[in-house]
Image: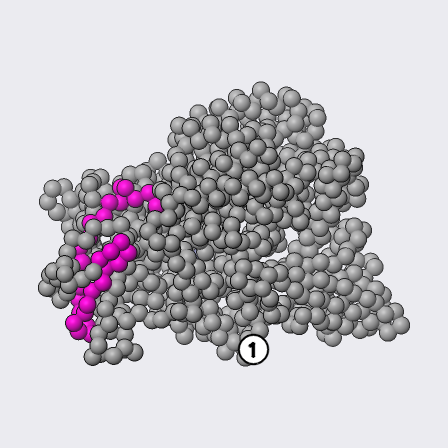
Amino acid sequence: MKDAQPRAIYLKDYQQPDYWIDTSALTFELGEESTLVTSTLNFHLNDSRQHDTLPPLPLHGQEMELVSVAIDGEVIPADQYQVDKEQLVLQPKSDRFETTIVTRIKPQENTSLEGLYRSSSMYCTQCEAEGFRKITYYLDRPDVMSVFTTTVIADKEKYPVLLSNGNAVDRQDLDNGRHLVTWNDPFKKPAYLFALVAGNLDFIEDKFTTMSGREVTLQIFTESHNITKCDHAMRSLKKSMKWDEDVYGREYDLDIFMIVAVDDFNMGAMENKGLNIFNSSAVLARQDTATDAAFQRIEAIVAHEYFHNWSGNRVTCRDWFQLSLKEGFTVFRDAEFSADMNSRTVKRVEDVNLLRSHQFVEDAGPMAHPIRPDSFIEINNFYTLTVYEKGAEVVRMIHNIVGKDGFRKGTDLYFDRHDGQAVTTEDFVTAMEDANGVDLTQFKRWYSQAGTPVLDVTDDYDEEKQEYRLTIRQSCPATPGQKTKLPFHIPVEVGLLDGEGEPMPVTSEGKTTLILDLKDEEQTFVFTGMDERPLPSLLRGFSAPVRLNYDYSREELIFLMSNDEDGFNRWDSCQRLAIDVLLELVAAVQEGRELVVDESLINAYRQVLSDTSLDKAMVAEMLNLPSETYLAEQMDVIDVDAIHRAREFVKQQVAVGLQDQLLATYQRLNIEKLYRPEAEDIAERVLKNTCMAYLVELDDVVGVELAKSQYAAATNMTDTMAALNCLIHATHESAAPIVGKALAEFAEKWIGDNNVMDMWFAAQAGSPRTGKLEKIKELMEHKAFDKKNPNKMRSVVSVFCGRNLVNFHDLSGSGYEFLADEVIRVDTLNPQLAARLINPMTRWKRYDEKRRELMQKALKRIQSHDLSADIFEVVSKSLA
Ligand code: TRP
Ligand code: ZN
């Protein structure tokens, strides 16, 4: 360990700071050697503290050189303050005072990508969660909100563009070819929302007129070679601004809104006030460089960051335990936006897929935590699927409990009551309760209890009484630090189908769907006037983030697939059927039995393919077999080889069984068309490419020929990547010589485009056939690879370890040793990235004994090094 062992901090210990900061004036002098930061802060004592004994003022600060400190204009000698590696402690002499602190930092040596750092030719910042303390000494906590004025000084030729939050209020040319720009942000904000950018950047500009008629300037900045890839992000931004006005009544509040794309970024994007900074992969798109999936991801992330202006910035978090206050709510908002812009059911399926195949795993593992954690060692480890995605599900449940209009009343009250404040998830729920006159006391357990609840559902039908009874039992597995759980309040949406597949009325008003409020450990819901035994459609729309068990027969699942009025459950029935069939085959592989795919699955798929009432994207979703990760999640002891064998076998059998129909569908959809990244067109492409992915499973040239000609003819990256992936995965021998050539040509064409090359890397790293460990190491030596860049590391290392399961889990243990080496290396450069890379190894207890031992050994080897708090926390919790 560096220093002492990092300590955990607890929600229950929260206290307000002793001092508040009213204004923060910062001046940055950006130099090639180092950057000088002068900060002038106006403090006042917290009213609830005693004025006669002024408490000391500890300011956070790391990795910087302290040049000078002054209070109220008087320089303080070094013996009147204490400074160590984490803080500067001052002793105030009055309850209102001004500090002037000068520090020197080295952004060009900062590889952690938090604080002020360099990315290619520019300077940029990332301050959430606790990065501001790497810029200057400060009260770096979200409840300290201050008005910022920022002056940036730099060489004018190298850095013509100098940006910070708010409005530009001054521009001047200085001596030695330097210039200065001053920005003022009139809104109080915590330091984590501070941003600065300096570079030689190009931009596109547009305008948006808000609901009250104010004109806002919109700008997107990139390096000049990417300037033609910003239009989609701009369109997405304008749509988001309009949607937030229409749906939430929220208007933008500054005269300018800027987005900057940078290549080196730890996450997707950051909502800094008026100056969002984005991972270039979350902004840049052009039909020839980005896939449909990328277009949709960009639309969602632009919206997400924009929506934070209200849910996060105007109303922010009191402390980092409240992270889900802004993230869960904002993910819910962006999901609803995407649902409105595209297909609602498809969006829901995608989100539930993510939640079930990754968040459920997290919730069942050593890092499991409630959406509002009660302790952490390193806050960066808590930007998780649980806080974001499960957090959004919790907000969605509130939405469903109080209804659409009630929810809007609740958010209006919340924004109104807490504008300009730093608040808690408790405040959010209280606003919902107050606006709607509901009691969410029991519901609040979703904020404090970790783990995925399990619902076991049984039913019986009494023909004489014409009564149908649904009994639901809830339980929740133990999670670290939480042995037992109290029952949750779970909204379970259900419908009932009659023998013809028609919906039966379930309420006295004759509605065919209803939400059951499950609050007890076990509850029975009685439906009367049932003249036949119904088939239940349970947890419609995935109305709660739970696992639901009900003993459906395969016939019943197929029946629901074609008859349920709930589109989500039609898909889910299809998934359940596929999982059932696949797990049976996994067992057959393990027992060395002959593999036979149940005809019912193939027949069901046939029916889906010919069902013209279905959205084409839904057809593709239904034909998509559950991922290896999700199947692994269903097994007590994960057997990656058997899962892979079984899944490959089913793919191939589906292809054999439906060959003609798949080909016909492909050909029907493979028509030349102007490219538009709109839901309908995307749906056609995804279905076409899903059919092609099955056809390359055949031991026949047909699929390879399709992929080859599609690859040659494609005019958009969606079709190009789909074809390339098909060639990589194709079984037929005719593919091999083409793949090598296609990959080489691709790299030659796109070598200058970072985001495109990431796809090229990922396609190879994720393939069981091409992505052997040797290949992975070779890819990492490629001239387009950068071992410090998070996108590159994710596209090779995370794809290999998280998606290419058979190779990562090779019985030699070589995959684990490789990951350990990478984690140890990256931890010294960028702890946040290292902590994300290590993730696949934290679930070591789920595997067979041999692999368990090997993974444990690799984790222990990591543990023996000098570690960041990030990796220390993950490794020690995993091994516990
Ligand atoms: N708040 C960002 C979001 O919208 C998350 C984020 C971006 C972040 N960069 C980060 C969090 C770096 C921690 C560290 O979701
Ligand atoms: Zn966010």
- Residue 127, image quadrant: bottom left
- Residue 632 percent location from the top left of the image: 64, 45
Establish if 857 lies above or below 774. below
In which of the image's four quarters is ligand 2 placed?
bottom left
Is residue 99 within the magenta segment? yes
Which amino acid type is marked by label 1?
Val
Q: Residue at x 40, y 39 (%)?
A: 825
Question: How far across and down, in percent of the image, does residue 267 sit?
Answer: 42, 48
- Please tell me whether mark 1 sits on a helix, a strand or a loop: loop
Out of 196 and 10, give the one closest to the viewer.
Answer: 10
In-image side of 571 versus 121 (left or right)? right
Q: On the rendered structure, is 737 left or right of 334?
A: right
The residue located at (79%, 53%) in the rendering is: 553
Q: Nearer the viewer, residue 871 or 153?
A: 871
Q: Is residue 383 above or below residue 396?
A: above
Q: Is residue 101 left or right of residue 501?
A: left
Asked whether 217 or 162 is in front, the reply is: 162
At 76% across and 67% down in the image, what residue appears? 470
Q: Which residue is mark 1?
A: 438
Under 8 Å from ligand 2: the CB of mark 1?
no
For the question of whether residue 517 can be seen, the reply is no
The picture quadrant where one finds residue 593 is top right
The image shows residue 363 at horizontal and vertical percentages of: 56, 56
The region drawn magenta spans 83-112
Q: Quadrant of residue 780?
A: top left
